[in-house]
Image (cartoon, rainbow, N blue to C red):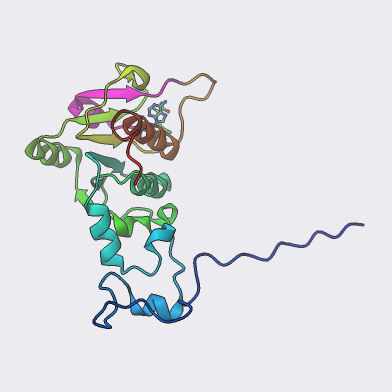
């Protein structure tokens, strides 16, 4: 009988810097590089161009080109999907993520990507709406509830807050009432809904097609 063995797991990232360390003319290490990572290797979940960069230097670089949309998520039941929403918000370089409801959220699926994002907490929907009003940002709900409009034909504003609901109940009634519009991703099968992580990725990609399709970092 053919014996299948598990393939050895490839280590993520890069090992210690090989050869002489990068140096400025003065001989100093460039400020964005982290001596600990150079010495020990960089196993973080970051693009290759950020290898060996200090954490603060990566955040500062992302800050120079954050997009205009914010991502907000209702967090009443410790939904495991929130981590995946946050990871996608990082991938699309959202202006910030907003946790609405419980302060503690399930970070597992975020794969540490939250450390490179700006995170805000709002104890309830009213607080998020006040914050968005103060920042001059329309809040757009994302859910396939009655009264929602199809995302596919919607011109999403460049600067906005995209508010997602959680697994199970979806957007709360208060959130639906407070949104300028609620956007529904048109479905074609039998399930009532997508999971929130998948829906978030679609809506962020839709935003990017409208506002960032020609931007390649
Ligand atoms: C699992 S859904 C639950 C709610 C859904 N309204 C229902 O009736 O089953 C969780 C979240 O994913 C997002 N979502 C799921 N399917 C969606 C769709 N077709 N369009 C827009 N958002 C969706 C919404 O943010 C929603 O609050």
Residue 111 appears at what percent x and percent y?
43, 57
**Magenta-span inclusion, residue 168:** yes
**Magenta-span inclusion, residue 180:** yes
Which residue is drawn at the image coordinates 36% and 38% (left, top)?
166
Res 63 visible? yes
Residue 217 appears at what percent x and percent y?
34, 47
Write the start and end of the magenta stretch as one range: 167-186
Which residue is drawn at the image coordinates 21% and 51% (left, top)?
120
Which of the pair 127/162 is nearer the observer?
Answer: 162
Residue 4 appears at what percent x and percent y?
81, 59
Which residue is drawn at the image coordinates 47% and 21% (left, top)?
187
User: Where the N terminus falls, by quadrant?
Assistant: bottom right
Compared to 191, does 83 lie above or below? below
Which of the pair 181/11 is nearer the observer?
Answer: 11
In this picture, residue 189 sits left or right of residue 25: right
In this picture, residue 1 sits left or right of residue 211: right
Compared to 204, does 101 lie above or below? below
């Amino acid at each position: 009988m053919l014996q299948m063995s598990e393939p050895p797991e490839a280590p993520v990232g890069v090992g210690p810097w090989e050869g002489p360390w990068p140096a400025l003319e003065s001989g100093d290490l460039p400020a964005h590089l982290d001596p600990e990572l150079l010495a020990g290797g960089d196993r973080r979940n970051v693009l290759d161009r950020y290898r060996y960069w200090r954490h603060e230097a990566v955040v500062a670089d992302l800050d120079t080109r954050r997009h205009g949309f914010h991502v907000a998520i209702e967090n009443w039941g410790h939904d495991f999907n929130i981590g995946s929403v946050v990871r996608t918000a990082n991938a699309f370089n959202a202006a910030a993520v907003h946790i609405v409801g419980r302060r503690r959220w399930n970070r597992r699926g975020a794969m540490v990507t939250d450390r490179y994002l700006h995170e805000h907490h709002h104890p309830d929907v009213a607080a998020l709406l006040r914050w968005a009003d103060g920042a001059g940002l329309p809040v757009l709900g994302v859910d396939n509830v009655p009264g929602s409009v199809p995302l596919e034909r919607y011109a999403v504003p460049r600067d906005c807050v995209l508010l997602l609901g959680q697994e199970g109940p979806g957007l709360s009634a208060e959130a639906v009432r407070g949104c300028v519009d609620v956007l529904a991703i048109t479905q074609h099968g039998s399930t009532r809904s997508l999971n929130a992580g998948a829906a978030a990725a679609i809506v962020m990609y839709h935003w990017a097609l409208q506002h960032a399709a020609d931007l390649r970092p």
